[in-house]
Image (tube, helix red, strand yellow):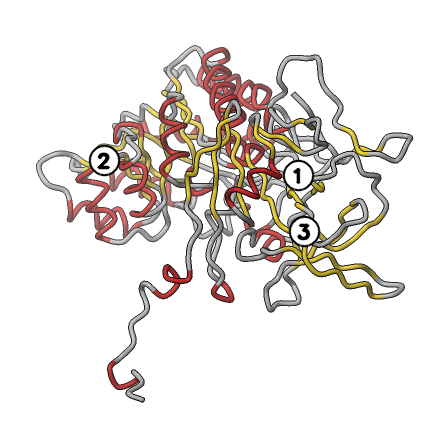
Amino acid sequence: MVSTPTTVAASGRQYLPVSTDNPASPNQSLLPLTAGVNRQDHLEIGGCDVVELVQRFGTPLYVLDEETLRTACRQYRQAFQQYYPGESLVIYASKAWNCLAVCAIVASEGLGIDVVSGGELYTALQAGMSAETMYFHGNNKSVEELTMAIETGCTIVVDNWLELQTLVGLAAEQPIRIMLRLTPGIECHTHEYIRTGHLDSKFGFDPVQLDRVFEFVSQHPQLDCVGLHAHIGSQIFELQAHQDLTGVMVQWLGKAAHYGLSIRELDIGGGLGIRYTESDDPPSIAAWAKVICEGIVTACQSQNLALPKLIAEPGRSLIGPACVTAYKIGNQKEVPGIRTYVTVDGGMSDNPRPITYQSVYRSVIANRMSAPLTQTVSVAGKHCESGDIVIKQADLPATEAGDVLVVMTTGAYNYSMASNYNRLPRPAAVLVNQGEASLILQRETYLDLVRQDCLPERLKSHG
């Protein structure tokens, strides 16, 4: 296992310090757990030379390390088994990156899946996921999506009154298995766009509606309310907020019993942060799980309640550290006294997080890993947008056109939020494991870009 390659030794050269300890919690690593430098001085991931991957598959290229993803899945599952005496289930929040290969891997590791659209549900089914471990979220599910979820047999996480009433109308002979999403009113320190637990949120029922919601559900036997759900946000480093959440949710559990509801599951969401820069210091997967599990146990004991099935739904902390994105460097522009721009052949269409969330990333030159770090540059994307900056301040060696720049920790919300802005085809993705690279997402072509276009007859040229 290796850690960050952006450390500078006394000689001014990059190096990858090798740990002799057991594998770290993946969410605390800047690079995939299998990363290293080979004899060609190239970055290697999953036993594959990243420079050779670029030559074979082109750029931009997402490189997903199977071992890192599987390690995170196992650490989550084992931590909940260790710290929670009742039944538990870890489900993958697939909005972070939903594709056939990722869904298949998490399913093979014994995880369930959280989906937020008909498309994510369809993909998970095609990957072989079991409907019994699927949970359908979303604050504005269409009737078509709800019907699809009912026919599939997955659990529907109900977000609002309209959805509750719609489900009553859609219910047939078999009761619909639902959970209720509630807003806990817990603040956490993260970007305002990814805080979802505070009261001013578009998600979930407000706590003041709790009695009305429980009463409504108790009066409609077509709704089999098996659980309660809450989620306080994403990219969270503090444990106290999650500990507070456990107490609030168990209070809800006790209140539901007064309405004759047999709540059997508590879903505490996800939100554990990951390391994007050297200064980031997130708790480990095990530490996060321990706080959650002990919090639920303590709260249930204090209220003399039976332990519910405990569900957690990590996304970013499972997939984020397992992937890097490789680019080819092109033009450079020096603005004297201000900055130097180094341009890559991708940008906001394959990673919209910097322009959307002001997210910060780290990078290396994959074809010259031991070259001295001699300059601080801004890594700019190729899109016609001044804000298309991948990294504002990147410490790099002297770079040349054709160098392979690798941006770390790009597994979460990169491909899943990718677009065709400026009509750029979306990149390919490869899965690497023990020296083998498998294509899991084909690179889009120009034909793909116009495949859904329709040109009316009157606009067609007759010249």
Name the residue at 63% across, 39% down. 408
Residue at numbered disc 2? 218
* Image x and y of residue 360, in percent: 68, 47
Residue at numbered disc 3? 402
In primary-sequence order, the first of circles 2 and 1 is: 2
Between label 3 and label 2, give the one nearer the viewer: 3
Name the residue at 60% across, 20% down. 287
In primary-sequence order, the first of circles 3 and 2 is: 2
Name, please, the residue furthest toward the left: 173
Name, please, the residue furthest toward the bottom: 463
* Image x and y of residue 219, in percent: 19, 38
Q: Are marks 3 and 2 in contact (CB under 8 Å)?
A: no
Kindly state the secondary structure of the residue where label 1 is placed: loop
* Image x and y of residue 345, in percent: 60, 56
* Image label count: 3
- The kind of residue on which mark 2 rests is Ser
